[in-house]
Amino acid sequence: MRTRAETLLITLKLIFYYGIPSHILYFGESLGDNLLLTTLSSALVERGYKNIWIKCNQEDIFKYNPSISKVLPFDFLLSIRLLRLFGTKLVSPVYTYYIHEKDQDAIPPKHIVLEMADCLGLTGPIINKPIFNLDPAEEKKGRIFPRQIAIVTSTSGAKIPMLNKEWSIDNYQQVVDSLCESYNFIQLGDPAGAPLKNVLDMRGATTIRESAAILKNSMLLVTHVGFMMHLARAVDCRAVIIYGGREKPWQSGYECFENISSAPPCSPCWLHNKCDFERKCMTVISADLAVKSINIQLRLYGTSLAAEILNN
């Protein structure tokens, strides 16, 4: 454990080399939420702030990002008093909190990006798009097939797995079976999830940046709400997102995607794993409906994704 004097000296050295940060943003271990910090850092830069630092253990998320000057490990000790003396704002832009006895997140009343923006005092228009930049060599390696579709079926690899986000593996398999003669599917995600047939199984075999490159070269992504959804938007990959009813697209999603949701009376619940209704919000979504949504997105392939503006 460093002493206060050592922490003060290290903080001074960082400021000497990188300048005084206007903001230091940190979230935790969730990949998706950390990626959303790039949306906020871009909004800060647009408003004239400079030298934004991030505290996160996944530095690769922020590589080549022009709005972020420095990435430190999440538990890296800094002198808070010194930073505040320099006017630096240290912010963890949360959008909900966990209610343990209910196994539920508090339901956000507006889009999570706007909830996070409130923590930073950001008002006005915010472009709802995270940033993830690849170099040409990285991007080239992500092209495996001429007509590839990425698919992620399980939350098992997430920092906080949630059964209420998951669609049945049988439905995902029906989607693959319906389209695999015309398209090559690449299954990404955690190897703990169930494997699909008639796909290139790359679960657990790619880094974050390799997954991003595959998405960048894919015609679209099919998955649930989570990190891969945000990563697809960051690299301009079209997507079909199986939302169900746990949360609503207007709370966490992107209008340019095909977001398949349902609206039972209990929705949105923001429950993690508990459900008194046999997850009907997910079971009512058929594979045929997903295929129709996929075909809509495929017809749009090659056209740019519209920039969505959120107003705070």
Image (tube, rainbow, N blue to C red):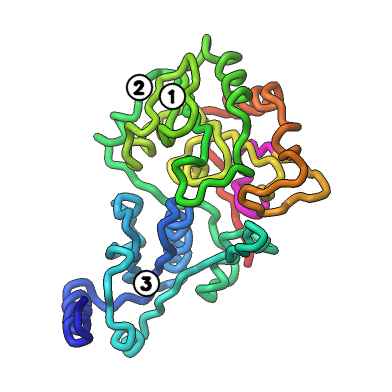
Task: Please tell me which residue is depicted at 70% across the width and 36% down the height of the picture.
Answer: 282
Q: Can residue 64 be seen? A: no
Whether residue 62 appears in magenta in the rendering, the answer is no
Task: Please tell me which residue is depicted at 38% across the width and 39% down the height of the picture.
Answer: 212
Task: Please tell me which residue is depicted at 74% across the width and 39% down the height of the picture.
Answer: 278
Q: Secondary structure at mark 3?
A: strand
Q: Which residues are magenta?
A: 250-260
- Quarter of the image that includes the N terminus: bottom left
Answer yes or no: do the residues labelled 2 and 1 have beta carbons within 8 Å?
yes
User: Disc 2 designates what residue?
Assistant: 144
Give whichever of discs 3 and 1 has the lower sequence position: 3
Q: Amino acid at mark 3?
A: Ile
Q: Residues within 10 Å of mark 3 (few under 14, many from 20)?
A: many
Image spot of residue 17 (x, y percent): 17, 73
Q: Amino acid at mark 1?
A: Ile
Which quadrant of the view contains residue 244?
Answer: top right
Task: Determine the CA span between mark 2 and mark 1.
Answer: 9 Å
Image spot of residue 251 (x, y percent): 65, 55
Whether residue 258 appears in magenta in the rendering, the answer is yes
Image spot of residue 234 (x, y percent): 45, 46
Q: Secondary structure at mark 1?
A: strand
Q: Is residue 302 left or right of residue 50?
A: right
Which quadrant of the view contains residue 96?
Answer: bottom right
Task: Determine the CA span between mark 3 and mark 1.
Answer: 36 Å
Mark 3 vs mark 1: in front: 1
Q: Can residue 312 be seen? A: yes
Give whichever of discs 2 and 1 has the lower sequence position: 2
Which quadrant of the view contains residue 173?
Answer: top right
User: Disc 3 designates what residue?
Assistant: 24
Any mark on residue 186, and which? 1
Q: Is residue 225 left or right of residue 52?
A: right
Mark 2 vs mark 1: in front: 1
